[in-house]
Image (cartoon, helix red, strand yellow):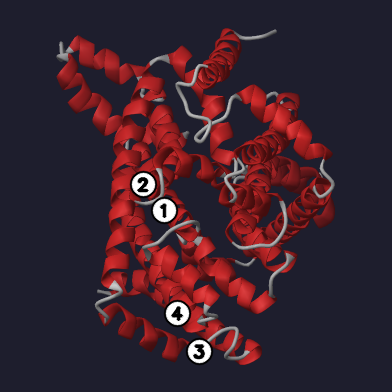
Amino acid sequence: MTVSLRSLRDPILVAISLVVLWQVLHQIAGDSAVTAPAPTLAHLWEMVGQARFLPHLRETGLAFLQALAISCVGGVLIGVVLGGHRLTGEVAEPILVGLYSIPKITLYPVILLLFGLGMPAKVAFGALHGIIPVVLFTMNAVRNVNRTYLRAGRAMRLSPAQTAWYVLVPATLPEIFSGLRIGFSLTLLGTMLGELFASQRGLGFLLMTAIDLHDVKTILAIAVLISAFAILANAALLAIDKRLHRGAAPDSEKT
Amino acid sequence: MIGKATVIRTVVLLGAVGALEIACRTGAIAPTMVIAPSAMVKALVAAMQSDDFGGHVQQTLSAVAIAMSLAIVGGFAIGALLHWIPFLRRAFNPFLAAYYAIPHFAFYPLLIVIFGLGPAPLIVLATLFAMVAMIVATMAGLDRVPRVLLKTARIHRLSLLQEIWRIRLPAAAPHILSGLKLAVAYSFIGVIAGEFILSTSGIGHEIAYAYDNFDNPRMYALILFVLAIVTTFNMLVWTWERRLARRRGMA
C-alpha cells in the first residue's frame, strides 16, 4: 500500500505544479493569451461530448493507429534484417541516423504530392517519423545478442524457429520495446504535424481552425487532450519497459 | 582509409539519385509529383540568385542559432543544477521522462497567441524542444563520472573548481556531446517545422508557400537546400565528436 502511494506521489505533484504554473501564466498573460485551467477543462469536457467532435477524433485516431502499426511491424522487420546482416547494417545506419535528424516536415509536401491530400498522407508521414527509431533500436538489439546464447542453442540442437522463439526474442525484446516506445511518441508527433498542414479533418485541423478564429480556449483544450493522452500512454509503456529491462539478462544491463 | 561499407553506401545513394533522375526523365514519375534531381539543382541555383532568398535563409538560420545556444547553455546549466540538488531532480524526473512524448507542436499556436507572429515563438518552441535533450544528457554524463576519478581528485587535493574542470567535465563529455548533437538537430527541426506550419517568412514558410502555388521546382530546390544545410551541420558535429572520442581512445 505504501509502495503504490509513493510511486503515485511524484506524478501527482508534477500534475499539480503544472496546473499551478498554468494558472500563474493565466494571471500574467490574461484571458486573450492563456485561459484559466478550470474553464478550459470544462470547455474540453463539453467539446468531447459534442457529436461534431467525434469524427475529428476518430480521423486522428485512425491515422495514428495505422501509422503506428506500420512503424512497429515495418521497423522491427527492417531492424531484424539490418541487425542480422552486418554489412547491410553498416551501410544503412548512417543513412538512417541522417534521416532521423533532419526536419522531416520539409518532406511533407513531397508526401502530399505522392499520396494526395487526406488519410494516406497523414499515415505515411506519421510512419516516417516513427519507423526510424524502431529500426535503429531493433538493429542494435539484434546485433548485441550474446553469441554464447546462440552457441548454447546450437549445442542443444534447437531448430531455427526454436532459436528465434527461445533465444532471440527474449534477448532482444527489452531493447526493441524501448524503440517501440520512442516510435510511439514520434508517430503521434508526426501524425499531428501532418494534420496541422493542408488538412480538412482531425484534431490538427481543429487546432488550425481555432488559431484562425483566435479561439484560445479550444487551442489549449486540444493541446491538453493530446498531451494527456501522450503522457498517460508513455507512462504505461515506460512501466512495461522497466519491467522488461529488469527481467533482462545481467550482462545486457551492463552495456 | 575508406571502409567497404562507406563505398557501398555511396554507390547505393548515387544509384538512388540516378534511378530517380532516369525515372523522371523518361516520364515514369510525373513532374507534378517529383522533379528530376538535376532540375532540383538547377532550380536551387535560380532560387539562390533571387533577391529575397538571402533574407529568408538569414532569418531561419539566426533563429536556429539563438535557439541552439539557449538550449545548449540553459540545458547544461539546468542539468548540472538538477544533478547537484537531488530534491529538485526527484521532483522533475517524471516530467523529464514524459517530455518527449508530448507533441510540442500542439502548443505552437498558443506560443503565437502569447508572443505574436515573428521569430519569438519559433525560438521559444525550438529552445523548449531542444533543451530537455541537453538536460537529460548532462545529468546522465555527470551521474556516470567514475568514483575512482573523484577519489583520485581528493587524493591530489584538487579544489572544487579544479575538480569540476579537470575531472567531472572531461569525464562527462561523451554524454554531454551526444546531448549537444541532439540539441542541434532538434533546434533545426523546431524552427523549420514552426515556420512551415504558421509563419510569414523563413525557409520553412517558403517551402509551404511554393507548395500552395504548385511551384514544384522552387519547392524541391528549397527542400534540397534545407536538407543539405542540416545534414552538413549534423555531419560536422558528428565528425567533431568522433575526433574527440578518438583522442580519448574510445572510438
Residue nearest the observer in this picture, A134 or A188:
A188
What numbered label is drawn on residue A218? Answer: 4
- The residue indicated by pointer 2 is A123
Contact between marks 1 and 2 (CB within 8 A): the answer is: yes
Q: Chain of mark 3?
A: A
- The residue indicated by pointer 1 is A191
Callout 4 amino acid? Thr
Q: Secondary structure at mark 2?
A: helix
Instruction: Mark 1 or mark 2: name the one nearer the start of the chain.
Output: 2
Residue at x 48%, y 75% (from the top left corner): A210
- The residue indicated by pointer 3 is A36
Q: Secondary structure at mark 3?
A: loop
- Label 4: how many residues lie within 10 Å, few (<14), some (14-19) or many (20+)? many
Q: Secondary structure at mark 1?
A: helix
User: Image height check: is A4 above or below B197?
Assistant: below
Residue at x 37%, y 63% (from the top left corner): A202
Callout 1 amino acid? Thr
- Whole-number angstrom distance, CA of label 3 to CA of label 2: 34 Å
**Marks 3 and 2 share the same chain:** yes
